[in-house]
Amino acid sequence: MTGPSLPQLPAPVRGYLGDPSLTAVWAAARRRLECNRLAPTGTVQVQLDTEGAKRLAGLLGTRLEPGLRRIQLSALEAALRASAAQCGLVSVVADLTGRPLQDRTSAKEAQQTAWTALWQQLDNDLTRAGLAHAGWIADWLAELRSTGILTRAGIEAATRALGGAVRTIATLTNTPLHPAAGDEAAVVKQWELSELAADTTGDAHGLDEGRLTGMLVLKAIAAACTLPPPDSSAGRRLLWEQVGVSTDVLSGTVMVWRLAPPGPHPWAQMMRDRRDLALVTHLTLQELRTVPDVPLTAPGTTVHFCENPQVLQSAARYGLPGILICGSGNPSAAGWELLQRLTSGGADVGYHGDFDWPGITITGRVMRAGARPWRMHAADYLNALAGLPTDRLTPLTGEPVPTPWDPHLRTVMRQQGLAVHEEALLTELLGDLRTSADV
């Protein structure tokens, strides 16, 4: 709740009350009023200098000595109303402190009431959509409450997002989340993500990655399919595909250097031509899915995979012979698709990323997809750290994450507390690509 709008105190009164010697009085009064439903009751304790004591005594009509003094707000209220100010303490404090007061207690109660109403409305919406008794709903609601995803967004954004999420989930239930084998009803409609978003949220981008509505729907799909919440673009794409929704297959790309698939397929020949022309190629998910049966390498071929585009750019600049893929940070869906195709085809994929906690998180995901570490051990970290000048040292931030391929790496990173970005090992990485030897 907001207090009265700013009054217009007469200039002489404002000049008298607004003297810097009384600033602490009005600041203390403001704090007390905002916690007291704007009621001028109770006391405040303030330190007064000689001028402040003189001016406040003049207002209150009493004798005041300088020093730490306790002031009754009710007395201030009565004195102000009887003075040339002709208004109460709330209005005077708002004027002298430059902004209306907030009834913080009432605002907190109103906020709690609004959140209660939101959860009740969600329950009603789920009931109307025929979803209230679905076995996974309780897990979904528990996830929303425990993660705080709605409270962080705020009541208005949460209300809008939940409305769109329930409509989307209700639409998707036309395709059962757990279809029985051979159940023809399981293929009621195949959606494009933008089409589904436009239909259920009124915005073709309403379910895009990063949008709250899309996050809520994905959490519902994960709960319904008894899968963990996705932690990557590829994981989100796979979740959408669980319910027959196709995501964008053109925007996300993965960069490759000297990837030259064998065989007679025209696409394989095109990739070999690009290798011979020393061209970097940006592969899309759509392109990779267009040639699902084309082998990407001969079994056992060494492929290096990096995080930072500068590594691939340097490899191309020097025309190095090793095959290199760049995920440009957390790989796109195209990057994950390429990685899975390579590892399932028998390629020996070595991965290198940043020695910071986000980089280690990405490394862990890539390892779980079948890659091996490429200069990502504790010794590599310490050697790189030793070679860095002081002005290039940056502190590690965030929570430490496990390094199961080398548990000692996590230990030494925590001990050192410093990040090493991939460019610091550029000489070693390029050397590996120059000889294309296993590391």
Image (tube, rainbow, N blue to C red):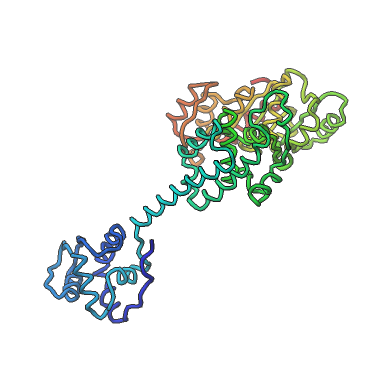
Q: Nearest the camera: 127 or 8?
A: 127
Left or right side of 89 for 325: right
Q: Where residue 243 sits in the image (x, y, percent)? A: 67, 34
Q: Taking 58 as reference, is 291 above or below it? A: above
How many marks the image carries: the answer is 0
Question: Which residue sits at x=57%, y=36%?
Answer: 220
Residue 28: which quarter of the image?
Answer: bottom left
Q: Which quarter of the figure is the N terminus placed in?
A: bottom left
Left or right side of 134 for 87: left
Q: Where residue 428 sits in the image (x, y, percent)? A: 62, 28
Q: Where residue 410 sits in the image (x, y, percent)? A: 48, 26
Q: Nearest the camera: 139 or 58?
A: 139
Left or right side of 11 for 349: right
Q: Taking 133 as reference, is 31 above or below it? A: below
Q: Which quarter of the figure is the C terminus placed in?
A: top right
Q: Where residue 193 sits in the image (x, y, percent)? A: 69, 42
Q: Nearest the camera: 340 or 162?
A: 162
Residue 380: which quarter of the image?
Answer: top right
Q: Do we see residue 324 in this rendering?
A: no
Q: Taking 204 as reference, is 4 above or below it? A: below
Q: Do we see residue 198 in this rendering?
A: yes
Question: Which residue sits at x=64%, y=28%?
Answer: 178
Q: Taking 330 as reference, is 116 above or below it? A: below
